Image (cartoon, rainbow, N blue to C red):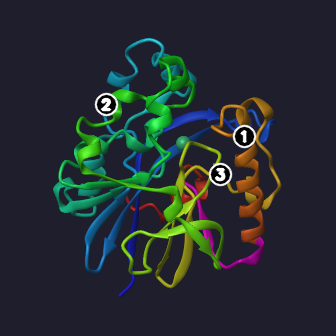
Amino acid sequence: MSLRIHYLNGGYCRHLLASIDGRTLRMVKSHAVFLAIEHPELGWIVCDTGYGTRFFEATRGWPYRLYRWATPVSLRGTAASALAAIGVRPDDVRHVIVTHFHADHIGGLGEFTRARIYYHEEALAPLVAGTPFQQTRAAFLPALVPAGLSARSTVIAAKNFAEDVALPFPTYDLFSDGRLKLVVLPGHAPGQVGLEFTSDGVRTLYCADAFWRMEQIVAGVNLPRPVLALQWDGAAYRVTIEKLRELARRKTHRLLACHDEETQRYVTA
Ligand SMILES: [Zn+2]
């Protein structure tokens, strides 16, 4: 039996399309999609959590308030309320994968009190080490990191990711059953990972925020320079995009990204 993947919306922000293509003066919605994965033996696994409901509280202080001004956010409710639509409670979830620690991916993390949390070893430490201004610039809100996280985290060392013939990125077989691989996708955020899985017979690479919109991959659109400069590592981001373009040409995987409008086609709640 293979995995069943449910795509859920966890709030959204609005931004000018020009922030991606450098020219289109149209406001678009950027949904914070997260995944509920039904594993035949391990039960429910969640990947990212959306904005949750604590975003406004976490951006009340200075300078974190700048984040709120830069991207006007509409919250949709808790991660639990999105999961309820598919009959799942946070306490049913025993494993949570964090692709990266941006606010729109970890806002609901505190709801999963019975889950083990998985992330790349470089994903959190450089953000925690930053000054409040550096954290704000890096879209990191420390108030969204649940207390006691490290005690129930499995942090995956960079050296455990290995070359993979199927992908131009190193991968790590998370539960050693070949069903769910973490994929290193450098550039957008420190230690960002995506997921590779097969669901409904379709081999998929879920890229989190390695790209935002499909035109970056299939139409050669490059981020404007000031937006590229906001990525954690702009040079690595560009290399990742080039590799994803090459992968798209091979047509071996369906490529999906968290905030891309095309992903909305698969969203159930
Ligand atoms: Zn992000």
Q: Residue furthest top?
A: 62
Q: Which mark is residue 54?
A: 2
Residue 217 seen by the camera = yes
Amino acid type assigned to the residue bearing label 3 in the image? Phe
Direction from residue 234 to residue 45 in the image, left or right: left
Disc on the earlier residue, 3 or 2: 2
Estimate the x, y position of residue 197 in percent, counting from the top left: 49, 74
Q: Amino acid at mark 1?
A: Gly
* Mark 1 burial class by Cα count in 10 Å: few <14, some 14-19, many 20+: some
Left or right of 229 on screen, residue 160 = left
On screen, residue 62 above or below 252: above
Residue under the image location 83 percent in, 55 percent down: 220
Residue at image location 27% in from the left, 42% down from the top:
149
Tell me, for residue 234, which label it has, or none: 1
Taking the magenta stretch, the answer to whether it contains residue 252 is yes
Stretch in magenta: 249-257
Mark-to-mark CA distance, 2 and 1 = 29 Å
Report the front residue among 53 and 3. 3
| Eye-nearest disc, 2 or 1 | 1
Residue 170 place in picture, x, y as percent: 60, 66
Secondary structure at numbered mark 2: loop
Q: Per the image, is 256 magenta?
A: yes
State if disc 2 and disc 3 touch (CB < 8 Å).
no
Q: Which residue sits at x=40%, y=21%?
A: 59
Of the numbered discs 2 and 1, the one sitting upstream in the chain is 2
Q: Is residue 143 above or below residue 117?
A: above
